[in-house]
Image: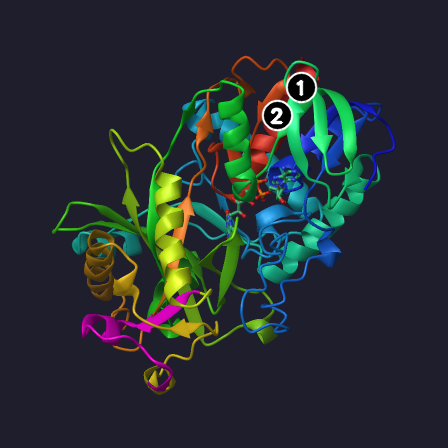
Amino acid sequence: MKSRRSKYDVAIIGGGISGLMAAYRLAEKKPSMQILLIEKGSSIESRRCPMIAKDAGACAHCKHCAVMEGMAGAGAFSDGKYVISTEYGGWLTEFLPRETVLEYIELADSTLVGFGATEERYFPDDELKKLCLKHDLHMQQAALKHLGTDSNYETMKKMIAAVAGRVEILTQTEVTDVDKGTHTLYTSGGEMIADTIIYAVGRSGSRAFSGWCKKNGIQMTSNQVDIGVRVELPAIVWDHFSNKIYEPKIWYRSKQYGDVTRMFCFNERGSVVMENTGGVLTVNGHSYKGKDKKTENSNFALLSTIHFTQPFKDPIEYARYVASLANLISGGSVLVQRLGDLEAGRRSNPVRLKQATTRPTLCVVPGDLSLCMPKRQLDNILETLHALETVAPGTANHDTLLYGIECKYYSARPAAVDFELEGCKGIYAIGDGAGFTRSLSHAAAHGLYMADKILKG
Ligand SMILES: Cc1cc2nc3c(=O)[nH]c(=O)nc-3n(C[C@H](O)[C@H](O)[C@H](O)COP(=O)(O)OP(=O)(O)OC[C@H]3O[C@@H](n4cnc5c(N)ncnc54)[C@H](O)[C@@H]3O)c2cc1C
């Protein structure tokens, strides 16, 4: 697509929740501002994953993964768990006072409510926390909303329509470079200039963004990496938690290694999905709000956290490597295995999978996770599943399904002062792509904060 002008006040790279919130706030507060939002994926209405639509049995390796890229970003088809807390969801409190972050999370929430998001909130439950503590399990508590994959999509559609009325939006346009001196943006649709530039590229754009930072002499620090599996089991196993708090978020320190393994991203009566980040296939999960779209199963991520020390500095590449191994042995897909097969030291095959009482919601290749998951992480995951069994019996059943690999690579973080990139006047970075956030609510809050900062100054 071609832009209408060649010069703008503000250009935002990425149409995910952080970029959209920034655009919305800027346009709302200063209608005379010339704002451009550039998104490499499609419009929200045109986003269609052939696998989810059941047009393809395996990942079609689309040029732009419809799950991760396009207007509304990675959150477009997400379950829409919206955390109203600084307890987890990002690292903004390392840079801003906790109250400020909370204020912006609330502001983002009321913006979404204005576009139709639910007002219903789940609150922490100390009884469940006590039950976990009795078994050396640690539950993180926060107020939470469940927007739901279907309702979240409708809310985002309305928000994008409101932004489109005031901001120029270019879809299917990729920013390939930015000149930090002249503020020229080089895109697949031509060149343009902006006084202020905001990188809001999300996880799918983080690799290219890191490359750009390195090229421009900006120091990068890497965060942790989490590697593990997506667990799927009958929804009734965890409903004493999910009925009360919606999302049990529990961590456990393994006796064998002393490593932390986290259960999170819980999807009640949801589906497991595949995602493609820069050519590497991994798993994730979501769940719809509409009763007709609910499944019999719930799913959650179970991930073991690794912090590398010297000399290795590239945890993201490590995670990509592990995930690629699963892609390799599954013939270009991801793996699913019954826990019973994994513990018996044998692969799951189509016959064994057919015998499972838990029916998979994602059709992928039955195989052997122990052939691609490093021993340490696999041991941590097995130990944690048995620890979780103590508070939710049935978690470590023979037919519990494990999909792999799931990993959360948190993007490397650039050196910046109040999110302005080192040595790059007027160029900022926000959201998941720059390693500042890792959730919808925190990324949204970051976008709003950035808009206010620009308006002030
Ligand atoms: C399946 C799934 C389920 C999830 N569920 C939840 C949940 O329930 N709750 C929760 O809090 N979080 C969830 N998340 C995480 C959440 O979606 C992210 O934290 C959030 O979307 C981050 O927002 P962002 O704006 O930083 O990045 P993104 O949403 O990733 O948006 C970045 C956008 O930038 C575009 N882009 C990248 N590079 C370029 C470029 N060079 N030029 C132009 N455009 C570019 C991308 O195409 C993308 O659309 C989920 C994620 C996935 C994938």
Residue 87 shown left or right of residue 196 in the figure = left
- Does the magenta run of residues contain 218? no
What residue sits right under mark 2 in the picture? 450
Image quadrant of ligand 1 equals: top right
Gap between marks 1 and 2, in whole Å?
A: 6 Å
Secondary structure category for the residue under label 2: helix
Instruction: Tell me residue 206's x, y (percent).
Output: 52, 37
Nearest to the observer: residue 94 or residue 7: 7
Quadrant of the frame with the C terminus: top right
What residue sits right under mark 1 in the picture? 454
> In which quarter of the view is residue 266 placed?
bottom left
> Compared to 203, does 377 lie above or below?
below
Q: Are marks 1 and 2 in contact (CB under 8 Å)?
A: yes
Residue 349: numbered disc: none
> In which quarter of the view is residue 53 placed?
bottom right
Instruction: Tell me residue 81's x, y (percent).
Output: 51, 52
- Does the magenta run of residues contain 346? yes
Q: Which residues are magenta?
A: 334-351
Instruction: Tell me residue 38's x, y (percent).
Output: 72, 37
Ligand 1 has an atom within 8 Å of the beta carbon of the residue at disc 2: no
> In which quarter of the view is residue 225 placed?
top left
Amino acid bearing label 2: Met
